[in-house]
Image (tube, rainbow, N blue to C red):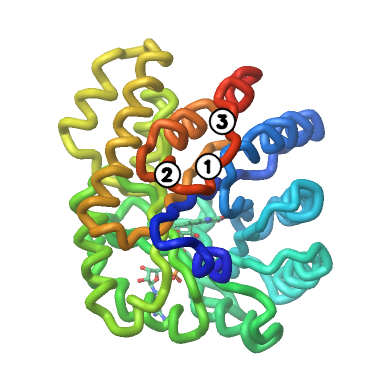
Amino acid sequence: VIEQINALKPHERFCSFEFFPPKTDAGFRNLLARLHRMMALNPLFLSITWGAGGSTSEKSLDLAATCQKELGVTTVLHLTCTNTNKEVIDHALRKAKEANIRNILALRGDPPRTEEYWTPNCDFKNAVDLVRYIKEQYGDYFCIGVAGYAEGHADGADTSEQDPAKDIPYLEEKVKAGADFIITQLFFDVDKFVAYESMLQQNPILKKAVLIPGLMPITTFKVFVRATKLSHALVPPQILERVAAPGNDDDMVKAIGIDIVSDMIEQVHTRTEGRIRGYHFYTLNLEKSVASIVEKSPVLNATSLQQGVDHDDAIDSDSD
Ligand code: FAD
């Protein structure tokens, strides 16, 4: 990932897409067809999520290997390190290498939902431990990314301690241990992201890592409310009003969502003076909104990465 970002021309901006592994074989086949279509949008990389505690390990590895080998696209495998054991991590890293995957998003993972009191188990306590372990075991074979939180990280429902400045020393540790890029949690408050980017820019260690904002297209009001709640993302009142206005008219919500996220990209680009090189989409395995945003965004369309996109082809057979 980092080599490809560094190879971009100064005016070029990239997009990248996150997917999760479907539960069934039919779902996998459908997603694969969708991924083939979405390659027309020319993402710089795809990232594949890892279920809590390794619960989707084989399916994640399978999807990531398929993306890397079959689609020939740079693939980032997410890997969480708590509530699991070293064998699962070793197996995942070995399989990733066998599939020619060169990028890992090293994460801590979340507490299991059923446990009221959570003590991160044994080998790895925080994401930094995984970054160090990967470096120890594989040297520079893997390019490593980590998570960042423009609004501060919060565990569970307790948001009282949420403060991005508090995470900074730990983010520094992750970068010092070898992380090259940081993908942020989804956000809708551009002010928060701009302030975060500025804080990282002023930090001699963190400014060396590539910061990639994470954006979630808005598909339905229900999903929007659930996702922002789960990720503790503040929703500016003017955005909430716009998304809530059409009620259950999902098509309208989607259309408004496309405008909102496209506008966020413009704002981020301008207000960070073009320092942001790319935009990561939490696709929720859907295609239509992402395709429209990528196509609509002058920032992303200014890049020569957007070659040969046939918009109709990209979204015609979409059922999301
Ligand atoms: P860490 O970097 O370990 O940070 C967790 C918390 O601990 C923070 O509050 C931090 O400030 C604090 N901290 C860090 N280091 C220390 C230390 N040494 N001492 C004390 N405190 C410390 N989850 C999944 O299960 N699967 C996925 O595929 C997945 N993908 C994600 C992708 C992105 C881009 C993002 C942003 C999140 C993703 N998550 C995923 C969620 C992630 O696992 C959770 O947000 C988790 O709660 C924190 O992970 P982290 O890697 O940020 O943890």
Q: Which residue is mark 3?
A: 287
| SS state under label 3 | loop
Q: Which residue is mark 2?
A: 300
Q: Nearer the viewer, mark 2 or mark 3?
A: 2
Tell me where residue 250 appears, x and y as whole percent.
Answer: 41, 15
Location of residue 85 by image quarter: bottom right
Residue at mark 2 to residue at mark 3: CA–CA distance: 17 Å
Question: Considering depth in this image, is 23 or 148 the residue closer to the camera?
Answer: 148
Looking at marks 3 and 1 on the same chain, the residue that comes earlier in the sequence is marked by 3
Q: Residue at x 62, y 59 (%)?
A: 76
Q: Is mark 2 within 8 Å of ligand 1?
A: no
**Horizontally, is 190 left or right of 63 in the view?**
left
Q: Looking at the image, is 63 positioned above or below residue 180?
A: above
- Tell me the quadrant of ligand 1: bottom left
* Mark 2 residue type: Leu
Callout 1–callout 2 Cβ contact below 8 Å: yes
**SS for callout 1:** loop
**What residue is drawn where x is 32% and y is 47%?**
187
Image vertical order of residue 266 relative to residue 217, above or below: below
Q: Is residue 184 visible?
A: no
Residue 306 is marked as: 1
Q: Is mark 1 within 8 Å of ligand 1?
A: no
* Residue at horizontal 50 percent and vertical 73 percent from the top: 127
Q: Tags 2 and 3 in contact by the CB under 8 Å rule?
A: no
**Badge 3: residue crowd in 10 Å (few <14, some 14–19, many ≥20):** many
Q: Nearer the viewer, residue 315 or 10?
A: 10
Point out which mark residue 157 bears: none
Image quarter where the N terminus lies is bottom right
| Residue appearing at x 31%, y 72% in the figure | 167
